[in-house]
Image (cartoon, rainbow, N blue to C red):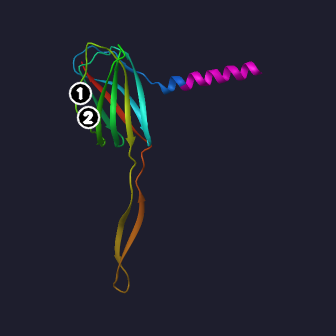
Amino acid sequence: MKKIILILSLTSAIISTSVAQTPGVVVSDKPGWHKIAERHVNYKTDRDEIVMVGNRHFKQIKIKVEDAPINLTSFEVYYSNDTKKEIAVNKMLNIGEETAVTDIDNTQALKKVVLVYNTVGTVTKDVTTKTTTNKAGEKETEKERERETEKERAEVEIWGLK
């Protein structure tokens, strides 16, 4: 019984470790922009690490946001020779927006990219839905509390230029 519990515990630890480290995989050598990786980030100040696999030499890099806005503090590019470049952004990126293109060392393969961000939720607001006139000739306004659907997370895409 103890062996079964030990095996289940080890299996669980291995699975959770492998899920936490989602690698970015690039298989194309064609020139142009390539999506290196994507990560779903949640609503708290966070730091996500994305390990790179495959052909990882790029001239430039940029970050694009989908699904929900985030406040991107910075991102760090780590190279295979264990050097790093930190890119300060300090900008609110709305859905569909991206960072400025940043030059990186294309003589070194990328090892990982670390995102430092704070996600931003959506807002709840009052919406006037209907104005009517009652029997006495007075206008009545019905207000309905409308809750916008809150996104649970934003999708962040990392793009590299070959």
What residue is drawn where x is 23% and y is 19%? 59
Q: Looking at the rendered structure, which numbered label has been put on residue 56?
A: none
Residue 111 lies in the magenta stretch: no
The quadrant of the picture occupied by the N terminus is top right
Q: Position of residue 125 (x, y in %)?
A: 38, 60
Q: Determine the secondary structure under disc 1.
A: strand
Q: Position of residue 113 (x, y in %)?
A: 36, 25
Quote the CA–CA distance across marks 1 and 2.
8 Å
Task: Please identify the residue farthest to the bottom as the structure is shown.
Answer: 136
Q: In the image shown, does 82 or 153 lie closer to the viewer?
A: 82
Question: Which of the pair 149/85 is nearer the observer?
Answer: 85
- Numbered range of the magenta stretch: 1-16
- At label 2, the amino acid type is Thr
**Rendered view: 153 above or below 56:** below
Q: Residue furthest front?
A: 83
Q: Quadrant of residue 161?
A: top left
Q: Which mark is residue 99?
A: 2
At a point 39% along the width and 42% down the height, the residue shown is 119
**What secondary structure is the stretch in magenta mostly built from?**
helix
The answer to whether mark 1 and mark 2 are in CB contact below 8 A is yes
Q: Residues within 10 Å of mark 1 (few under 14, many from 20)?
A: few
* Residue type at the position of mark 1: Thr
Residue 104 in the image, given as x and y percentages of width and height = 25, 21
- Between 105 and 123, which is closer to the camera in this rendering? 105
x and y percentages locating residue 85 in the rendered image: 30, 24
137, above or below 68, in the image: below
Question: Residue at position x 26%, y 18% from top?
Answer: 58
Instruction: List the single residue furthest toward the right.
Output: 1
| Residue that carries the numbered disc 1 in the rendered image | 102
- Report the side of 98 relative to 44 (left or right): left
User: Which residue corresponds to the image point at 66% horizontal and 24% vertical from the top-left?
Assistant: 9
> Helix, strand or loop at disc 2?
loop
